[in-house]
Image: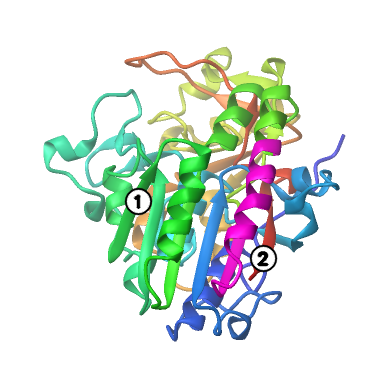
């Protein structure tokens, strides 16, 4: 089975272009062009713009759900960013720029500034433990982009799950926003309604729902628990639309990425390839579907030969600089930090393979069934759902 590569379209069809459309509707200039299927003019007259992000709800998944409210309101698809993963795509929603500029390149990131491979959104070391901010190290030390909400002239709200509402990352990216938290799906929609009805001023409301992603990781997209949760979301949307009548609201529903199911037998374990592992100076970074490799200069030929011969069936090999030059991460001038965070080489997994290494960890994690971050259409394409009241 050959895998077709699906890359971001930053010229007018990606989530960064959606953010440009929203920004321009508030009179803010942007470097990236607006979304072709949702130009800023279509948003200018709405008193409330709500961006509701359902983490992990891919376009390919949703288009199969024909008799659902979300499918009925779907205008089409957009591409995510590279990598199509929460760390990169949510940072695009929250800054309005692509990874080329914000340089958040995957869940595991080499932070040269502090000499640590991190789990970037928890803002902690990859091996676990407390957030870096206990050591007086903050997101602003590694992320030099302003929050999207600080760039637009609007009353802003940021609605997040109670466990992450006060995290270092969420706090930094909620600048100029009133933060509202929730614990349940009912609470989630209740907080959106509260924000909409808080005043007659023009508002931008960002609302993030993470549970679909968590279930897809744990069980895969086709599991009955994941399916049941999707139906719950769809049912709540029906009721929510009724509450939006006469509020002059444009509700934009989308996602940061989609998913592929990855059976355990499709896992490439680095410890099974010692000749490759001895070439690396750091643990693998990025994601299981796309890994950044930091290679010893004296071992580059060995590394290239090994991947091209022993791993050819499972992944393709690319020089990191080539992918930057080919605009995988975005358009325009790259953030200087990007070069440090994508390693020397990039492994892009084929079909539904993943590649993993092991490190000493505070707590061992259960293997995931669902993954994202690769270049399949299932991972790269996200829905654009527009509901106007």
* Disc assigned to residue 180: 1
Depth order, front residue of 146/21: 21
Residue 9, position in %: x, y?
66, 65
Q: How many marks?
A: 2
The N terminus: image quadrant:
top right
Residue at 67% x, 65% y is 386
Secondary structure of residue under mark 2: strand
Residue 343, position in %: x, y?
44, 44
Residue at 40% x, 60% y is 102
Instruction: Residue 241: say if magenta.
Output: yes
Q: Quadrant of residue 291?
A: top right
Secondary structure of residue under mark 1: strand
Alpha carbon of mark 2 to alpha carbon of mark 1: how far? Answer: 22 Å
* Disc assigned to residue 387: 2
The disc, 2 or 1, on the residue closer to the chain's N-terminal end is 1
Magenta residues (range): 231-253
């Amino acid at each position: 089975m050959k895998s077709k590569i699906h890359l971001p379209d930053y010229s007018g069809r990606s989530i960064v272009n959606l953010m440009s459309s929203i920004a321009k509707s508030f009179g803010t200039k942007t470097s990236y062009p607006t979304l072709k299927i949702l130009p800023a003019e279509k948003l200018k007259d709405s008193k409330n713009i709500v961006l509701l992000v359902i983490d992990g709800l891919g376009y390919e998944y949703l288009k199969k759900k024909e008799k659902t409210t979300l499918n009925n309101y779907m205008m089409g698809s957009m591409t995510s960013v590279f990598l199509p993963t929460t760390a990169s795509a949510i940072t695009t929603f929250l800054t309005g720029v692509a990874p080329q500029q914000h340089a958040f390149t995957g869940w595991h990131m080499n932070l040269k500034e502090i000499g640590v491979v991190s789990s970037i959104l928890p803002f902690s070391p990859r091996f676990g433990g407390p957030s870096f901010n206990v050591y007086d190290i903050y997101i602003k030390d590694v992320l030099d982009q302003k929050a999207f909400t600080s760039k637009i002239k609007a009353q802003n709200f940021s609605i997040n799950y109670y466990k992450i509402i006060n995290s270092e990352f969420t706090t930094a990216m909620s600048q100029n926003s009133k933060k509202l938290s929730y614990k349940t799906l009912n609470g989630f929609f209740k907080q959106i309604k509260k924000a909409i009805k808080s005043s007659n001023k023009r508002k931008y409301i960002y609302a993030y729902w993470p549970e679909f992603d968590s279930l897809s990781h744990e069980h895969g997209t086709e599991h009955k628990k994941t399916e049941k949760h999707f139906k719950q979301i769809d049912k709540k949307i029906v009721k929510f639309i009724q509450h939006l009548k006469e509020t002059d609201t444009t509700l934009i529903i989308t996602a940061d990425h989609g998913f592929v199911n990855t059976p355990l037998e499709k896992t490439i374990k680095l410890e099974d390839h010692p000749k490759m592992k001895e070439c690396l100076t750091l643990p693998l970074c990025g994601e299981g579907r796309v890994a950044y490799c930091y290679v010893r200069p004296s071992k580059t030929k060995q590394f290239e030969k090994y991947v091209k011969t022993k791993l050819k069936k499972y992944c393709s090999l690319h020089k990191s600089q080539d992918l930057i030059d080919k605009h995988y991460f975005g358009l325009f001038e790259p953030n200087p930090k990007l070069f440090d965070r994508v390693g020397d080489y990039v492994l892009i997994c084929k079909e539904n393979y993943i590649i993993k290494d092991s490190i000493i960890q505070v707590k061992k994690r259960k293997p995931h069934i669902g993954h994202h971050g690769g270049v399949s259409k299932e991972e790269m394409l996200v829905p654009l759902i527009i509901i106007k009241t």
